[in-house]
Amino acid sequence: MKSYYRESVWISKWVWILFIGIIVFLSSVLVVQSIFGLPAGWTPAPTYLLLTLIVAFSLIILNFGKLNIKVNSENIEVRYGIIKKKISLNEVVSCEPTMAKGRVYGGVGIRLGVDGSLAYTTSFGNAVKIMRRNGMPFIFSTKNPEKLSKIINEISKS
């Protein structure tokens, strides 16, 4: 199986800042309440809830922090941590550069668009759109949409 393309695309620095900020804030509240015994607010959050949220946000940012793309002679694999999408090259009708738009997907990550497409996005911007035989478009972020589209179109036709 010949490999044609590999790429890792990190999520936007603003998403990292948001998630790290949430984790730091929750950790600060946990320390203030648990170690110093000072209630944070009128109804302090229970320790188990703070720990659960810290772990959940940490796992989310670790899993969705980077999108990995692999294209080989048989399929296209797009992976967010443990969650992956594989598309056989036999399924590909065409591939073209596009832009992942906030108004279509409403955020980054794994999203269903208002246009019926499935997207794996790391930011609003450069992406490729794969048209599949089943009719459901698949969009994913990339730093090289023109190059990747050309590769996918060439090897899916052969």
Image: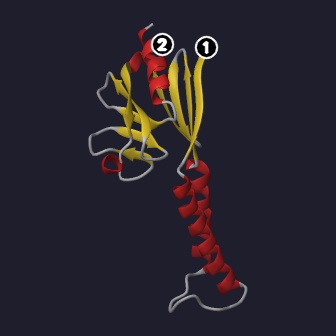
Seen from this angle, which residue lies furthest top?
A: 158
Tell me residue 96's x, y (percent).
37, 26
Q: Which residue is mark 2?
A: 155
Measuring 57% from the left and 74% from the top, which residue is drawn there? 49
Q: Position of residue 85 (x, y in %)?
A: 48, 34
Badge 1 density bin: few <14, some 14–19, many ≥20, Cα 10 Å = few
Residue placed at 31% from the left, 46% from the top?
A: 104
Where disc 1 sits, the SS reads loop
Residue type, label 1: Lys
Q: How is the image coloured?
A: secondary structure
Place residue 130 in its image quadrant: top left
Where is residue 81? Give x, y as percent: 59, 43
Eyeballing the image, is 83 above or below 157? Answer: below
**Residue at the disc numbered 1:** 2
Amino acid type shown at disc 2: Ile
Asked if residue 7 shows in the view, the reply is: yes
Dot 2: element: helix
